[in-house]
Amino acid sequence: MPSVAAKFRRIALIGKLRSPEVEASLGEIRKFLSSRGCEVLKDGGGADLAIVVGGDGTMLAAARELVPAGVPLVGINQGRVGFMTDIGYDDMRAGIGAILEGRYVVEERSLIDAEILREGKSMLRTVALNEAVVGKGSQGRLIEFELSLDGEFVYALRADGIIVATPTGSTAYSLSAGGPILHPDLDAIVLTPICAHSLNARAVVLSAGEAITIRVEPTGAPSVLTVDGQEGEPLQPDDIVRVARAACRTRLVRLGRTGFYRLLRTKLSWGGER
């Protein structure tokens, strides 16, 4: 559940500098923070808080980078949906000011750990806040894979791929592929097939403690592992992708007014108009 955290004095500013709008916002925030007596840092090392300016993609990248340091994040939305970025551009000063005055909560979000094994050797290991996706590459053909849970074979499937999503990621790619929405406090993982060549393949919600193994069949099209929508890592036939709950968690700073169901209504038009 959300909890009240300590005040912030050393603050890192993160954003894509190639965007003129983001650069202007970063400059404005830097001046505002300095006027409030805060030390402004260029990266998250030693920071009490990271302010991320951009869209959800920038927020996801920053979250993954700062997890080892345990730095909490707050987002300023300059993207499209901005589901994870709590403060709008027009409310930037008021929102940051409220956080500096202690009017905020901190939400802990679970992560998943994804690893590629090739002939028993680890080729890549990383964490994801939203999802890990085994999907087809640039070709249009279906990939083929075997899915096992805690070492037990579940099924073999031909599909465009499969999404392994956290509760946070259940409102992202998994939702677009027909998966369920999970409250972010749930200790669970969602498995969502993508355009499966089967009438029986459905999304399923798992206990977060289950270990997921996806083995790439050599008979299918080339496939890739993509984490949080970033650049994909090519997979080879018989590669194994292991996904499990990560030991670490990330922390998101939120203004107290924004509940999960309000986000669903405002960002995803959940339930339509009243």
Image (cartoon, rainbow, N blue to C red):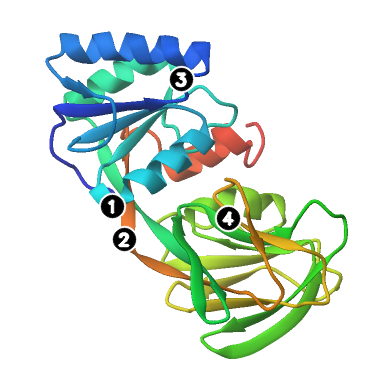
In space, the residues marked 1 and 3 are separated at their CA atoms by 24 Å
Residue drawn 45% across and 59% down?
Answer: 126
Q: Nearer the viewer, residue 57 or 208?
A: 57
Q: Residue 248: which numbered mark, if any?
A: 2
Disc 1 or disc 2, which is closer to the eye?
1
Residue drawn 72% across and 74% down?
Answer: 237
Q: What SS does tag 4 mark?
A: loop
- Tell me: 175 left or right of 34: right
Disc 1 or disc 4, which is closer to the eye?
1
Q: What SS does tag 1 mark?
A: helix
Which quarter of the image is occupied by the N terminus? bottom left
In space, the residues marked 1 and 4 are separated at their CA atoms by 28 Å
Q: How crowded is mark 4: few (under 14 residues within 10 Å), some or many (20 or more)?
A: some
The three-letter code of the residue at mark 3 reads: Leu
In space, the residues marked 4 and 3 are separated at their CA atoms by 33 Å
Q: In this view, does 121 lie above or below 256?
A: below
Q: Do residues under tags 1 and 3 come within 8 Å of each other at their CB atoms?
A: no
Question: Residue 59's spot in the image, x, y percent?
Answer: 45, 37
The three-letter code of the residue at mark 2 reads: Cys
Q: Do residues under tags 4 and 2 come within 8 Å of each other at their CB atoms?
A: no
Location of mark 3 (residue): 17
Question: Residue 116's spot in the image, x, y percent?
Answer: 54, 69
The three-letter code of the residue at mark 1 reads: Pro
Location of mark 4 (residue): 181
Q: Residues within 10 Å of mark 2 (few under 14, many from 20)?
A: some
Q: Do residues under tags 1 and 2 come within 8 Å of each other at their CB atoms?
A: yes
